[in-house]
């Protein structure tokens, strides 16, 4: 009888596929209603000697089944773990996805740097659209309809009134009008400008400028010079010098063109600066009283300085780029070479 139970139970334990089945078998053979319990019930009918012998055998069989079940449980757990590991396997040999990292366009880098220099000096930054009214691009800048300067700045007209701005001075004129009753003004206006130039190494029909404007009481030419010297030194290094040359713009009086000492030869003279030691980077001057008056500002009380610098020109000098067209043709090899500049 016990022999039969043993064979049957061991067989069933071996066939178990998982822990649930194993638990069922355990209850079936070792539970209160199991066959071993039944045998124990029948012990009553046996003699003392027989009781001892059968009782001992039943206990031996119980512990045999218990230990076999536990061994089987360990095996099943091990198999389950292996299966789980197999299912969740990660193939570390797979090639990772590769995302190419971009960088800022060189002109945007220079623009941001210039903005930061002026923000640190307490300037606002104004940016408005590239389609402008003739009124702000020319009229308010003291360049009347029949003025020959309009030929100089060959313009992309959209209609009789609208055009693609030819200089960021247009933003200056809008800002003056908007803040006429809210002085002082201290602002820079960076952005794209357009002229009908034939493109070559130093000209592009699209380029970038940054305009500067300060209007308050007692602004002097020396304030302009100090400001531009600081800008040049921040952009090209502490030893930079600048010089003012007399010039003419309709919207400033007096007007100057501003040179920086050549960053390539340090002012000694080289091919880039055509042996002069100087390179022109911007136009500037004291805001013409007529310009202030047209915007509604009392020119007897307030004065101002203004400047307009070529961002492309500054970028060419900073990065040693010889052809302005590179900035706009967007050859990926050219753009990638700026990864190394912070
Ligand atoms: N608008 C001039 C240009 O595009 C540059 C300029 C000169 C701007 C003198 C100014 C200035 O604000 O005061 O050539």
Image (cartoon, rainbow, N blue to C red):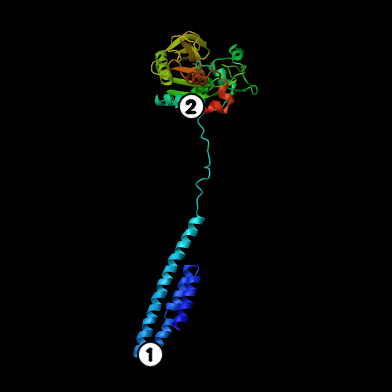
The residue where tag 2 is placed is: 109
Q: Would the CB of label 2 be found within 8 Å of ligand 1?
A: no
The residue carrying pointer 2 sits among few (fewer than 14), some (14 to 19) or many (20 or more) residues within 10 Å by Cα, namely some
Along the viewing direction, whichever of 155 and 301 lies nearer the viewer: 155
Could you tell which of marks 1 and 2 lies nearer the N-terminus? 1
Say above or below: 288 vs 5: above
The count of marks equals 2
Q: In which quarter of the image is the C terminus?
A: top left
Residue 181 in sight here: no
Work out whether 163 lies above or below 6.
above
- Which residue is nearer to you in this view: 258 or 47? 47
| Alpha-carbon span between mark 1 and mark 2 | 100 Å
- Give the secondary structure at mark 1: helix
Say which quadrant the N terminus sits in: bottom left
Q: Pick the residue in front: 27 or 215.
A: 27
The quarter of the displayed image where residue 51 is located: bottom left
């Amino acid at each position: 009888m016990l022999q039969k139970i043993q064979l049957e139970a061991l067989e069933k334990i071996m066939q178990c596929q998982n822990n649930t089945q194993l638990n069922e078998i355990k209850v079936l053979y070792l539970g209160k209603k199991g066959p071993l319990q039944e045998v124990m019930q029948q012990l009553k009918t046996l003699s003392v000697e027989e009781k001892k012998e059968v009782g001992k055998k039943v206990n031996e069989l119980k512990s045999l089944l218990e230990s076999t079940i536990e061994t089987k449980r360990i095996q099943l757990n091990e198999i389950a773990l292996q299966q789980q590991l197999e299912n969740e396997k990660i193939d570390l040999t797979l090639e990772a996805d590769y995302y190419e990292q971009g960088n800022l366009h060189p002109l945007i880098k220079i623009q941001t740097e210039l903005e930061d220099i002026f923000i640190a000096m307490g300037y606002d930054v104004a940016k408005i659209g590239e389609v402008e009214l003739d009124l702000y691009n020319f009229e308010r800048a003291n360049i009347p309809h029949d003025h020959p300067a309009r030929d100089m700045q060959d313009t992309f007209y959209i209609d009789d009134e609208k055009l693609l701005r030819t200089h960021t001075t247009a933003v200056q004129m809008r800002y003056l009008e908007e803040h006429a009753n809210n002085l002082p003004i201290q602002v820079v206006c960076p952005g794209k400008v357009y002229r009908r130039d034939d493109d070559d190494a130093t000209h592009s029909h699209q380029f970038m400028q940054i305009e500067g404007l300060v209007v308050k009481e007692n602004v002097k030419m020396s304030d302009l010079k100090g400001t531009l010297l600081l800008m040049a030194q921040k952009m090209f290094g502490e030893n930079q010098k600048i010089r003012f040359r007399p010039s003419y713009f309709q919207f400033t009086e007096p007007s100057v063109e501003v040179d920086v000492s050549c960053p390539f030869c340090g002012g000694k003279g080289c091919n880039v600066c055509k042996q002069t030691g100087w390179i022109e980077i911007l136009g500037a001057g004291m805001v013409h009283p007529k310009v202030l008056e047209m915007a509604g500002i009392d020119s007897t009380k307030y004065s101002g300085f203004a400047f307009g610098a070529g961002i492309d020109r500054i970028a060419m000098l900073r990065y040693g780029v010889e052809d302005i067209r590179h900035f706009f043709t967007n050859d990926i090899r050219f753009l990638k070479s700026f990864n190394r500049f912070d």
